Amino acid sequence: MIESSLSPIVACICEGGAETAIIDMLVDNNLLVFTREQMLNEEVIRCRSAKVFEQRYLRKEFKSKITVLRVLDSHSEGFRLSPAYEHKVDNVINVVTSPEIEMLLILAEDKYEEYIKKSSSMSPSVFCKQVLKMKDKIKSREFVREYFADIDMLVSTIQEYKKKRILKKGEIYLADLLK
């Protein structure tokens, strides 16, 4: 359970606009295992580099160690803190959303079975553009906020995605952040 591994302060770093929108919507509806008040500066942080994160956020003192929660779509993107700052961080947790954002749209449109039939010939992103005729900015903050304005639909598609996904040991999904 991810909740038990979180420090009292959570630096929630999101790679893109879609991830930022989803985390903001979920935290604002009190649906995550952490609250806005627990979040560093009470906001989602848009910063991919560990060095930049250190410079912007870790130069001040904290009452406790910090959990860095990275929501990103890359399995291989590194995040190595320098020895001068690593003592301030309890742990770094990666929530990999690739191709989760597109799959949430496919599930919400009830097109999962159709996608599975075509998955050998097209990625979820291409499926969303070609078959679902969704505009180019499907991973933008604005699109995600508008599309998932019904928070219950967002939560159910997040949960459904985890059920359908072949789970890899140690991998964390958006569903794992839900209460």
Image (cartoon, rainbow, N blue to C red):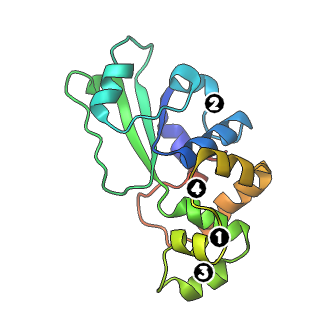
C-alpha separation, residue under disc 1 versus residue under disc 2: 28 Å
Q: Can residue 8 be seen here?
A: no
Q: Position of residue 16 (x, y in %)?
A: 49, 45
C-alpha separation, residue under disc 1 versus residue under disc 3: 8 Å
First along the sequence among labels 1 and 4: 1
Say whether marks 4 and 3 touch (CB < 8 Å). no
In the displayed structure, would residue 78 be above or below residue 108? above
Say whether marks 1 and 3 touch (CB < 8 Å). yes
First along the sequence among labels 1 and 3: 1
Q: Please report the residue visible at 43 percent of the width from the left and 58 percent of the height from the top.
A: 171
For disc 2, the neighbor class at 10 Å (few under 14, some 14 to 19, many from 20) is some
- What amino acid type should be assigned to the residue bearing mark 2? Thr
Q: In the image shown, does 47 or 8 lie closer to the viewer?
A: 47
Q: Quadrant of the C terminus?
A: top right
* Quadrant of the image occupied by residue 26: top right
Marks 2, 4: nearer the viewer: 4
C-alpha separation, residue under disc 4 versus residue under disc 3: 20 Å
Circle number at residue 115: 3
Q: Position of residue 101 (x, y in %)?
A: 57, 59
For this view, does 162 lie left or right of residue 153? left
Mark 1 sits on what residue? Answer: 106
- What amino acid type should be assigned to the residue bearing mark 3? Tyr
Q: Please report the residue visible at 33 percent of the width from the left and 15 percent of the height from the top.
A: 59
Circle number at residue 35: 2
Q: In the image shown, does 179 or 74 lie closer to the viewer?
A: 74
Q: Please report the residue visible at 43 percent of the width from the left and 66 percent of the height from the top.
A: 168
First along the sequence among labels 4 and 3: 3
For disc 1, the neighbor class at 10 Å (few under 14, some 14 to 19, many from 20) is many
Q: Secondary structure at mark 1?
A: helix
In the displayed structure, would residue 120 be above or below residue 3? below
Mark 4 sits on what residue? Answer: 137
Q: Please report the residue visible at 57 percent of the width from the left and 60 percent of the height from the top.
A: 136
